[in-house]
Image (cartoon, grey):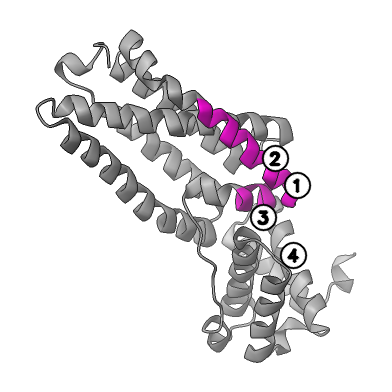
Amino acid sequence: MSEQHIPPLRRRFLEDMRIKGLQPKTQTMYLRAMRDFSGFLGHSPDSATPEELRAFQLDMKEKGIGAPTFNNRLTVLSFFYATTCPRPEMKRHMRYQRAAKKIWSFGGQLVSRQLDWGPTGTGLLWTCIGSGGLAGAFAGILVGRWGLDRVHWAFLGLMTASILAVGFGLGPVPVLIAGAIFGAAYVMLTGVYLIWGINALPDRPATGLMVGFLTIAVGQTTGAPVFGFMMAGFGPGLAVACFGGIALLAGFFPARGAINGAPA
């Protein structure tokens, strides 16, 4: 479609996405989401009513649209009604779906945005993550052989690499491999932190175990909404880069004493 034949509303939407600095793949996802909404309405989205927006959300729910895609579409509509066609009252009628933790929940949303994957591709990613998670059973063995610091650093590095690979959508095969690596690193690091807690409080191992579980839970609970906010506001690239950096920062807190290199 030549520039002069682009409808004014679409042209303004494209310009707003460029001003925001959205990547081409993200722009494609935004356009697809607006096309879905316009198709449901049967008319231009700038004249949509709050009741039509509510009906669109209900239609997605009845069709079994997953939370990542559901929230993706609302994020796009929020951008449209905040920037391209300012209508604050529309945002008040958007009801986001609840989701879980970082790649565990946002992985589907990331590959949907970056690789245009549907439910089948997303399901395959979950399978790879779950299969990789089986490696977590070897956490105690690896810590006993190589020491806590080395295992900690190694799997923090693998987790960071996998987050970046999935987040930037480096291609179908690399993303699936990264999913398996993420699953292994996630479960392995969970085991590492539990071992860390037990060894840090040798006279109170139950307390150390509880502290380990608690810190993991707090990190997941606070990290998920922050990641979601960053991805919605600044795009997936910045979100995954920041969280990859945070993962590496954890490696600068070394284990102490017998914890490092002792059998678990």
Other-residue count near label 1 (Cα within 10 Å), few / some / many at <14 / 14–19 / ≥20? few
- Residue drawn at point x = 65 percent, y = 52 percent: 23
- Residue drawn at point x = 17 percent, y = 30 percent: 205
Residue 227, image x, y percentages: 45, 53
**Along the viewing direction, whichever of 166 and 68 lies nearer the viewer:** 68
Chief secondary structure of the magenta portion: helix
Which image quarter is the N terminus in? bottom right
What amino acid is found at the position of numbered circle 2 in the picture? Leu
List the residue tagged with mark 3. 26
Counting residues from the start of the chain, the first of labels 3 and 1 encountered is 3
List the residue tagged with mark 1. 120
What amino acid is found at the position of numbered circle 3 in the picture? Thr
Distance between the alpha carbons at the discs numbered 1 and 4: 22 Å
- Residue 229 vs 153, above or below: the answer is below
Check whether the beta carbons of the residues at disc 2 and disc 1 lie within 8 A of each other: yes
Residue 196, image x, y percentages: 25, 27
What amino acid is found at the position of numbered circle 4 in the picture? Leu
**Along the viewing direction, whichever of 102 and 133 lies nearer the viewer:** 133
Please tell me the numbered disc located at residue 31: 4
Q: Nearer the viewer, mark 3 or mark 2?
A: 2
Q: Is residue 74 visible in this depiction of the protein?
A: yes
Distance between the alpha carbons at the discs numbered 3 and 4: 9 Å
Check whether the beta carbons of the residues at disc 3 and disc 2 lie within 8 A of each other: no
**Is 192 contained in the magenta span?**
no
Distance between the alpha carbons at the discs numbered 2 and 4: 25 Å
What amino acid is found at the position of numbered circle 1 in the picture? Thr
